Amino acid sequence: MEAFTGPPSSSPPPGLDRLTARELEVLSLVGRALSNKEISERLSVGEGTVKTHINRIMAKLDLRSRAQVVALSYDAGLVKPAAR
């Protein structure tokens, strides 16, 4: 990811302060490439709840795709690239 976006930003992307603690947690898990099912199992919630969280994250941060969610989670420093 770093090859495409550069290093993570030193300041958090705008709008993160509008997310709830659970939305930040979901944002982090989406950034780790977990599926909705994997996230729901990890958080002990239904897949519909995960979808709702992702939709709210996207609406609050004006994102249009899951790929943008992943990129933002990396830029926010919620996800670190794997060591090679």
Image: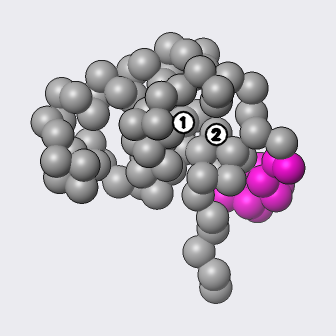
Residue 71 visible somewhere in the drawing: no
Rendering coords of residue 31 (x, y %): 50, 50
Closer-to-camera residue (20/37): 20
Picture layout, residue 25 above or below residue 34: above
Give me the C-alpha separation between circle 2 and circle 1: 5 Å
Which quarter of the rendered picture does the N terminus lie within?
A: bottom right
**Colour mapping used in the image:** one colour
Residue 6: percent from left, percent from top: 82, 55
The quadrant in which the C terminus is found is bottom right
The residue pinned by badge 1 equals 69
Residue at horizontal 53%, vertical 26%? Answer: 19
Q: Looking at this view, is 37 or 14 the one in front?
A: 14
User: Residue 5 location, x and y as percent?
Assistant: 77, 50
Question: Element type at marker 1?
Answer: helix
Asked if 25 appears above or below 53 in the picture, the reply is below
Magenta residues, as a range?
Answer: 1-10
Residue at (39% x, 21% y) in the render? 55
**Mark 2 residue type:** Leu
The label on residue 72 is 2
Dot 2: element: helix
Q: Is residue 7 magenta?
A: yes
In this picture, is 31 found above or below 66? below
Report the number of discs: 2
Q: Type of residue at label 1?
A: Val
Note whether residue 81 is visible: yes
Residue 81 appears in which quarter of the rendering? Answer: bottom right
Q: Are marks 2 and 1 in contact (CB under 8 Å)?
A: yes
